[in-house]
Image (tube, rainbow, N blue to C red):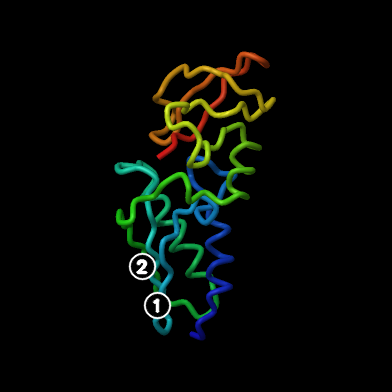
Amino acid sequence: MSDNRDALWQALQEVKDPEIPTISLVDLGMIHRLQVEGKRVTVEILPTFVGCPALDIIRRDVRKRLLRVEGVADVEVKFVYHPPWTSERITEEGRKRLASFGIAPPRPAGDNPMDIVPPCPYCGAEGGEIQNLFGPTACRSIFYCRRCRQPFEGMKPV
């Protein structure tokens, strides 16, 4: 196989997070390394949280999608924990996609680390409150917007 990294990256861009189907693994910043040796592709993925229940689905979806790329005969998916994934790895496009799905992206580094309540993804208001640190998945919390009175999810800053 010719080393067609663009086609491989485009294919990975189509693999969505099973728990947040509006955002790709690429935009979440989970793809650590992509290696090509002949017809074999190895992808190293940084899980967003240790013990993430979606890892088997992610492995399956990545393998399935990359095997459809011309010239790819074998795909190995490895989960690596060094360097650890951080919310700083989320791309700007990923942040927009999270907000459009009603999930507030985490605040950028440099903001007050004690203020974990993100702006409301619906109205943009600051000053919401945390309702529950534990959301529907390990990487999300539940917040409440005082302005538009909507509950919303937010990615935990890591």
Residue at image position (43%, 19%) is 132
Q: Position of residue 46 (x, y in %)?
A: 38, 54
Residue at image position (50%, 47%) is 17
Residue named by callout 2: 76
Q: Position of residue 129 (x, y in %)?
A: 51, 17
> Given contact means CB atoms under 8 Å apart, are the residues at marks 1 and 2 in contact?
yes
Q: Is residue 10 left or right of residue 47?
A: right
* Quarter of the view holding residue 135: top left
Residues 83 and 45: in front is 83
Element marked by disc 2? strand
Residue at image position (41%, 46%) is 86
Total labels drawn: 2
Element marked by disc 1? strand
Residue at image position (55%, 53%) is 27
Residues 92 and 4: in front is 92
* Comes first in the chain, label 1 or label 2: 1
The kind of residue on which mark 1 rests is Arg
Q: Residues within 10 Å of mark 1 (few under 14, many from 20)?
A: some
Residue named by callout 1: 40
Q: Is residue 119 above or below residue 105?
A: above
Q: Is residue 90 left or right of residue 92?
A: left
Q: Position of residue 121 (x, y in %)?
A: 63, 30
Q: Is residue 133 above or below residue 88?
A: above
Disc number for residue 17: none
Q: Is residue 112 left or right of residue 45?
A: right
| Quadrant for the C terminus in the image | top left
The kind of residue on which mark 2 rests is Glu
* Quarter of the view holding residue 96: top right
Query: Distance between the Cα atoms at labels 1 and 2?
Result: 8 Å
* Quarter of the view holding residue 113: top left
Q: Is residue 21 above or below residue 58?
A: above
